Amino acid sequence: MTKSQRDIIIFTAFGLAVMITPLLLRGNYLLNVFVFIGINTMLAVALNLLLGFAGQISLGHAAFFGLGAYISGILTTRYAFDPWMAMVAAALCVGVIAFIIGFPILKLKGHYLAMATLGFGIIVYIIFNETVDWTGGPSGMSGIPNLSLGPIIFDSYMTNYYLIWVFTLLTMLLSVNLANSRIGRALRAIHDSEVAARVMGVNVRLLKVQIFTVSALISALAGSLYAHTMTFIAPASFGFNFSVELVTMVIIGGLGSIYGSFLGAAILTLLPEFLRVFHDFDIVIYGLLLIVMTIFMPGGLIGGFEALAAAINRRKEA
Amino acid sequence: AEPVKIGALFSITGPPSFLGEPERNTAQMVVDEINKSGGLKGRKIELVIYDTQGDPTKANQAATRLIKDDKVVAIIGPSTTGETMAIIPIIEKAKIPLISCAAGVKITEPVKKWVFKTAQNDALAVARIYEQLKKRRISKVAILTVSDGFGSSGREQLISQAKNYNIQVISDETYGPKDTDMTAQVTKIRGSQAQALICWGTNPGPAVVARNVKQLGLKIPLYMSHGVSSKKFIELAGDAGEGIILPSGRVLVANFLPNSDPQKKALIAYVKNYQKRYKTEGDHFGGHAWDAVMLLKGAIERGDDTPAAIRDQLEQTKSFSGIGGIFNFSTQDHAGLTKDAFVLVEVKKNKWILVKE
Amino acid sequence: MENSDQIIQYLLSGLSNGSIYALIGFGFAIIYNATGIINFAQGEFVMLGGMLTIFFLNVFRLPLITAIALAVGVSTAIGIVFERLAIRPLKNASPLSLVIITIGASILIRGAAMLVWGKDTHALPPFSGNDPLYLMGATMLPQNLWIFALTAVIIIASKLFFHYTIFGKAMRACAFNSQAASLVGISVKTMVLLSFMISSAIGSLAGIIIAPLTMTSYDMGIMLGLKGFCAAIIGGMSSGLGTVIGGLLLGILESLGAGLISSGYKDAIAFIILLIILFLRPEGVFGKKETERV
Amino acid sequence: MLSLQRITKTFGGVTALEDISFNVESGAITGVIGPNGAGKTTLFNIATGLYSQDTGDVYLGGQNISRLPPERLARLGMIRTFQNVELFGQMTVLENVMVGLHTKSKSGIFSCAFKLPGQIREEKTIHRRALKWLEYTGITDLAGMTAGSLPFGKGRLLEIARALASEPRIILMDEPAAGLNSRETMGLAGLIKKIRTSGITIVLVEHDMELVMDVCDTVVVLNLGHKLAEGTPRDIQENPEVIAAYLGDG
Amino acid sequence: MLTIKNINAYYGQVHALKNVSLHLQEGEIVTLIGANGAGKTTLLNTISGIVPPKSGLILFSGTPIHELPPHAIVERGISQVPEGRQVFKPLSVEDNLELGAYLRYRKRDGKKEAKDTMAMVYNLFPILMDRRKQLAGTLSGGEQQMLAIGRALMAKPKIMLLDEPSMGLAPLVVQEIFRVIENLAGEQKTTVLLVEQNARVALKTAARGYVLETGKVILEGEAADLMENRDVQRAYLGRDKKEIWER
Ligand SMILES: Nc1ncnc2c1ncn2[C@@H]1O[C@H](COP(=O)(O)OP(=O)(O)OP(=O)(O)O)[C@@H](O)[C@H]1O
Ligand SMILES: Nc1ncnc2c1ncn2[C@@H]1O[C@H](COP(=O)(O)OP(=O)(O)OP(=O)(O)O)[C@@H](O)[C@H]1O
Ligand SMILES: [Mg+2]
Ligand SMILES: [Mg+2]
């Protein structure tokens, strides 16, 4: 079995699992949580392209997510755009913004890059808050229309689930493809040694900006989907905290692993739901779990899984 | 008998925890009291509380869980306007009555069939302040509002109502919810022609503003919002708090009310019980939850405990004396309060006293 | 429009806030210099300093100076426990995993503080009165002088420590290449522990000294931590003058932005200017060019 | 092929290169030797666009390439290896070589993400050719190993394989024999000659005189940023100045 | 002085050292030769405590040290010049050297003595003197190698482990380095374990040698004998051509 055949099998299995999950969760509130897991997976995969592959940190990805959501929201509620058109417009706008700011920002390295992206995130967040006439300010913007496709309106948990997950699966598929291609290799090469990558003919600057743009564009798409499924958005969802949470998802899941990003997103979205039984202690436990997970699986959940699988295999052989 | 399940969504943690915490405490306290004294028509109330952390996404998830998993008959909360707006579509679709504890006007305007609220509109608080400014012949004001949901909705009202009172907002500044120094803004206001400063925020920001005003020697009258109507504010502002005036629910000055006041009994009981149970002062934010639970109790006692029956009875609530004021709901009004819900109070010798009008 | 009194006041306010940011930034820089980790829990130590002091002051009725000493002591102990239990087990982890650990720790500490002390804000009385001092028509509080003084002491001390003592140099060596450091006989574990001790002590001290101005609550560390982080980065993560200048720059930009342009966009203005500075000098305001070579 | 003209480079107070000129003949092996710190690596860094010189110009096949970035130079057929071995440490040996083929392929982000037919075909070619270069340099058996865990000497070979994969016109090697034992160095000498036979021009910085004398056609000697001598290996070996500054008399 | 008995070391699943035994006498120069990937660096790192052995013993003057952390091993007097230099790039040359004497600095009078050693190192590598304020990361490869050696000398170790000290150095300097090594052993009674690719020179300098192949010691003996050994000649000595510095 070649690697690419294995990839196809894994992806198909994953896709099938995703498709039948709602049938098992019928009528359960978790179905709704899985909608958000889908959105967060999209975001984590997008950030992983940048952080896990190219090794470039972004502490401002919530801003792209938010921009996608707000552009979609504003275009549909104020200018009566068709939601699908608004979604395309949002993705394109954010792509262009990312491309333009990408050049100066990605010239920076390490903690300077962290700080610049953080600053960008804060600036955008402030704009969401302050341009009250456009965004409704801190108390948010409501009445964003749902997406629809012919007779289907995506306004129930079930329809939203399939809507979101189709996009999420597509994002994952394309990212897996990208990871195993010459572009994916060039990105990982940048991660390991920028100088050597350049000398091998990789246009490091351009490639970084390109992947930044792609990453932002996917995030914006996730933002649009979020806006049209929630029908309400407020700046609180797009702040610094969420940017950090996204980075956490990627790292907890496993840097450079697409399925890891899914695991990270799933765990971090589900965890608060499970921790609700602890009431006021939930935050403390959440913090503790983050630490414990990282200590025991420094390579991320996916690394943990692989180690486990290897151990089981060895058992079998022995 | 089976308990009646009521859901509650509060931002117990996160930036709006100053709202969610007293609300959660109060709701739990009221429900326990009801259960102790025999419950609702002989049935106990089970209160299912989820924390929303001030985040619309979390509010959405929690509301879904209350509806789908816990199968509650009614929901109280959330604490903020944003979170309330975020879950209204779910509520309307699930046909479950919601009594929000947030203040935003747009929650109940236009009227939504299943949505009510107990928090007084900011509009009413602003009106109270402007009335007094007009009496004092002040026509130029500076406003300094916090850039969160509470502050921005206050700011909106301050600006839009000003012309009704012939007042001019000549300086419009804001500060961040976590800012720890506002000297720059106050300095700028000091350089303006403003005759009064209105600061709209919740602890601790306004206390910092009060201190900065004192430090910079700004001598104009200082007004604040009901967001800081608690003893805590006086403690934080120290002597810089002296003379500050603000609109407040009656709960802050319950003892000063005339005995004829229909709310007085409930207010004093609330303050006493809260103090006893939580060792700290109950405030009017907690009062929103008190009102919400008691409104539900009334509605269920009068009718049935199905969501539809509760809704119908809520809408018919008349002259209910709560902590926030006297509620009169109708098909056109799901907020139910008038500006009498607010009184003006002032800090004198480290105590809140009622301003004589 | 704006008279010079006002400008001076903006500058003075900016300097006061900036030195707070710098003070907090130091904590970041110290751990970074010794371990290469960006410690997201640094803000929480600032919070701990203030909260613990108030706790000792109000609950045990201790004199201020004792309360401060105890608060610093307890925060340092928490720093040690943190390093021992959460950082040390992960010897060979990537810096990013360590960052996640510090994020976890910050959530944990904040949550625990919330459970122990509740969500209320508390104020600490100023060390030496509340009567404003006048300076060329502008005012500041005596507490600001305390902050300036502490900042100055810490810059000088850390400059001396990191650049002129063998211990300090050893710490920097550890951050760069811990394996090589151990090959010259440096105990990497001790150095990391020491850096966590120093930075939690400095963080809590900063938290104590600013508490009379900023007040304190379980979640105050987030925003101040963020600003301190920025100050440290603008200063090139140096543990000396750079961070101070970074902090002051941030403070002044904020203050002028709020005063002269728009208070709503004050942080945005500060960050836009900082971004422009970074774009013009990608190696940092104080960074040296081309230290890496092949 | 490659021509350096009057190159000067200073770092702060240190003058690493001063007024250096020389030509590299097409198809030849040119050695660059000199004491430590003479400026050899700096010369490579300038030629490959990593540093910019203070003054002077670099020509590649007649074209002035003075201000071109490294990635452009790679496309023009100039590639190098590194003194301190700059591998892509977390990637496998095979993947390292595949990155070397970057300039020989052109699928963009879009066609890679959507796996367009052209991209699939190209990917197969890349894979095949990478294997070929592993075989060429004799490290096929390491293909699946993570580059970071290679022993030093194998890393050097991998660097050469990766450089060759881009099918350069000229290849600059910075101390390829450092860390190899005599026997392995012998193998390397063979490899270098084989590369030359395939028509690729080679510039070689090396301290292993045995190797330099064995393979080089001409040798340039640098000392303290100046050109000390230039000539055939024989001449250089006998040049008293070179002996005094560099070779020593044992 | 140093005795290694049957040690095994692993990198994950890779068995890098297999039952390796070896011993060093005081003041002796011993060399370790072997092909790429034979495990020479791993062996030095095992002695230094960086790669702790899975099993086996390492005794230093009779006391076991294989469970000690690296810094404690340095403290007992075993220093290493690591492969690939590993100088502290963001620190100046002088700071690098000072850190070499880190443990001595913490002793009374250590600082003054360390200054003397530093003068000795500068004397040995005059270029470092010129570059002493420069950041180590900007030094040329060879200069960094000199610095790495100088740094280890600063510790005045009882045993010095050298991992390819001549790598990247000009022939003239290599001669110098080997003179220093001989000198260390001869005059200062420092024991030296030398890993060197240039087996010919290594065997000439050393008294004894070990040959390592895929993690196992396959040969050991007097250096002169090894030099004559056909297998060694074929595998490590290469062409029988005179080396350039032996003219
Ligand atoms: N980025 C830099 N900053 C400061 N000085 C530098 C820098 N790069 C090189 N130098 C100095 O320039 C001189 C030449 O260095 P270069 O690396 O070219 O030497 P080299 O000939 O390759 O030596 P070696 O044989 O030891 O590798 C050295 O003295 C070095 O210290
Ligand atoms: N970090 C590591 N992870 C996994 N395997 C490793 C690692 N380091 C070394 N190895 C493996 O251990 C074996 C011995 O390597 P070592 O570096 O000790 O060899 P060496 O004899 O020093 O070689 P060289 O002459 O190239 O320096 C090799 O097979 C190598 O691939
Ligand atoms: Mg060199
Ligand atoms: Mg080795």
Image (cartoon, coloured by chain):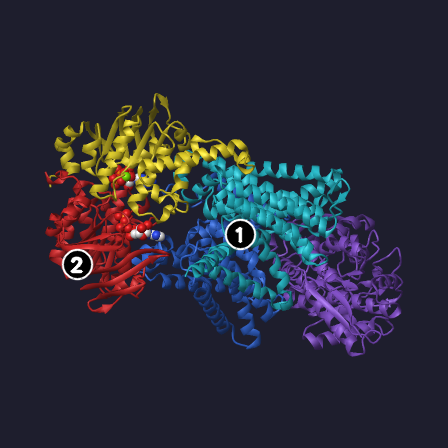
Chain colours: A cyan, B purple, C blue, D yellow, E red
Viewer-proximal residue among D181 and B294: D181
Direction bottom: furthest residue? B37
Q: How packed is label 2: few (under 14 Cα within 10 Å), some, or many (20 or more)?
A: many
Q: Quadrant of ligand 1?
A: top left
* Residue E191 circle label: 2
Which residue is at a point 66% across and 52% down the rendered structure image? A20
Q: Residue E14, image x and y in percent?
A: 34, 55
The reply to whether discs 1 and 2 touch (Cβ–Cβ < 8 Å) is no
Which residue is at a point 76% across and 39% down the rendered structure image? A150
Give me the chain letter of mark 1.
A
Label 2 CB sits under 8 Å from any ligand 4 atom: no
Viewer-proximal residue among B263 and C5: B263
Residue marked by disc 1:
A260
Task: Check the picture and name the quadrant holding the N terminus of chain E.
Answer: bottom left
Give me the chain letter of mark 2.
E
Q: Amino acid at mark 2?
A: Thr
Which residue is at a point 31% across and 23% down the rendered structure image? D1
Answer left or right for D45 relative to C29.
left
Viewer-proximal residue among C92 and E87: C92
Answer left or right for B120 relative to C64.
right
* Residue E49 circle label: none
For mark 2, give the secondary structure: strand
Which mark lies nearer to you, 1 or 2? 1
Q: Amino acid at mark 1?
A: Gly
Q: Residue B293, image x and y in percent?
A: 79, 68
Q: Residue A13, image x and y in percent?
A: 58, 49
Q: Quadrant of residue B70?
A: bottom right
Q: CA distance from mark 1 to mark 2?
A: 51 Å
Answer left or right for D121 relative to B337.
left
For mark 1, give the secondary structure: helix
